[in-house]
Image: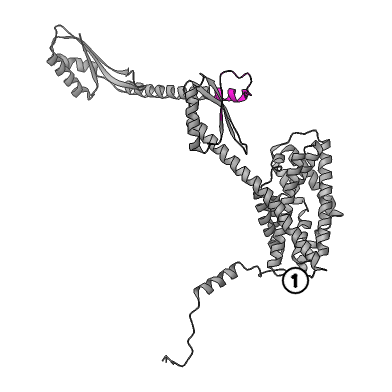
Amino acid sequence: MIVNDPNLPRTKPPDPLARFGAFLRDRFSLEEDKEEEAAIIQSISRGIEFKGVNLWTLIFAIFIASIGLNVNSTAVIIGAMLISPLMGPIMGVGLGIGINDLTLIQQSLKNLAIACFISLLTSTVYFLVSPLHIAQSELLARTSPTVWDAFIAFFGGLSGIVAGSRRDKITNVIPGVAIATALMPPLCTAGYGLSTGNLYYFAGAFYLFLINSVCISLATYLIVRFLGYHQKEYPTPEIERRVRHTIWLAVLVVVVPSSYLGYQIVRKTIFEQAAKRFVANECNFQYRQVINYAARFSRRQSKLELTLVGEPLPADSINLLRSKMPAYGLEDSQLVIKQGSFKDAEVDVDAITNTVTDQVIKYSQSSIAQKDQIIDSLRRQLDITQNTNIPVADLRNELKTLMPDVQTFTAAQSLVMSGNSPKPDTVLLVYAKFSRRHTAAERYRIQRWLQSRTKSKRIKLLVD
């Protein structure tokens, strides 16, 4: 028997928000399977030093990455990134800042500088002696860093330090971080820029390496502070203030220029897509053909160049094209039409050849398909004709009982081609000769009898 005692304290039902918060804390907690703080610091510190095995591994990885960039092999470049030990000192910088260990920061920066110098020297020497000097797509991809590279390096660094702080190491995370953040190829590309004297390649590639390094260190610093690692005291408040200012300066150096470059890449991509839609939808002309178009992006005024062959495009048609450009977001772009004489224009002969070849192939394929369709239809009709046995003698004898004056009679299935349709039609062609001229009513009676007798609705009766 349950007795409700009004003097007993009443328990409040659990708050749904509190329960949901507890659920989230349990799901996203990093405390489970966390390695001891001293073991993590020792593990990262071991990968900081570049001497002996680490140094030789770095040199070999640089050679492999340089060869991969030189021959444009993605698989070789990925292999070099997996071998590279560059992550050690970069994570060491973030760890040192996170626990206020000035000695660890100085050692990490010194070894990172040594690794950069050795990497640049090795890649420069390789590209100086390599017989291949053309910048391939894999190499060019490392010369234009953007804010997306910063995001990739930051989230990759978060994954790396979280996986490295576990007691049971997640073996597939660190190789994935090495591939995603791509520390090795930018240094090799910078070496290529030094060997060829191309400062643009050197600056772009080295800036990409700087972006990746700063973002990985920043991610390591944030996770170390989030996990609550024990922090040392800086020798003086001035040194602590200087370290913090350096961190913010490095973040600004990475984020601001890369954001601007990323914004320009977005503008360029939007312009090129709009130009492609404009050419596809509005540039289908009669008696002339667009053999090539070039969408040239510029921060001031972009340009869309069309190269035409065939009859010259009238001025009013060109003005009409320009009036349609704002609908595609090209109101600030310049339209240039190249037609007629190509004396001073850059004409892509391969593009013209490919365009003409494609048109010929399309016409030939369409013509062949149409002829194949007619042949198949004729074959089917011929098979029907051959398989249909017309009893000419019986029809003649039966017609003779109706019209005794018939002299000649024949009937056969025939194919009739219409001038408007490519498909033939089957008609029962009947020829009859009589000794006297028949009236229209008699001819109609003969045709009705033939339709009933042969079960054919399409009959052509020729009477002589």
Way the structure is coloured: one colour
In the orientation shown, which residue stands out farthest toward the top? Answer: 435
Q: Nearer the viewer, residue 439 or 269?
A: 269
Q: Report if residue 183 lies within the magenta region.
A: no
Q: Nearer the viewer, residue 86 or 408?
A: 86
Q: Report if residue 342 lies within the magenta region.
A: yes
SS category of the residue bearing label 1: loop
The type of residue carrying mark 1 is His
Residue 331 visible at all: yes
Q: Is residue 435 above or below residue 447?
A: above
Q: Identify the residue at horizontal 66%, vertical 56% (top origin).
A: 155
Q: Nearer the viewer, residue 405 or 283?
A: 283
Question: Does residue 200 appear left or right of residue 450 in this picture?
Answer: right
Q: Is residue 281 above or below residue 123?
A: above
Q: How many marks?
A: 1
Residue 276 in picture, x, y percent from top left: 54, 35
The quadrant the N terminus occupies is bottom left
Residue 217 in picture, x, y percent from top left: 73, 58
Residue 54 in picture, x, y percent from top left: 83, 54
Question: Does residue 357 appear left or right of residue 33 in this picture?
Answer: left
Q: Identify the residue at horizontal 52%, vertical 23% (top origin).
A: 289
Q: Is residue 16 above or below residue 96?
A: below
Residue 456 in picture, x, y percent from top left: 23, 24
Answer few, some or many: residues within 10 Å of disc 1's Cα (few below 14, many 20 plus, some between 14 and 19).
few
User: Which residue is identified by label 1?
Assistant: 230
Residue 96 visible at all: no
In the orientation shown, which residue stands out farthest toward the right? Answer: 52
The quadrant the C terminus occupies is top left
Q: Identify the residue at horizontal 52%, vertical 39% (top origin).
A: 329
Residue 439 found in image quarter: top left
Please provide the residue range marked out in magenta.
335-357
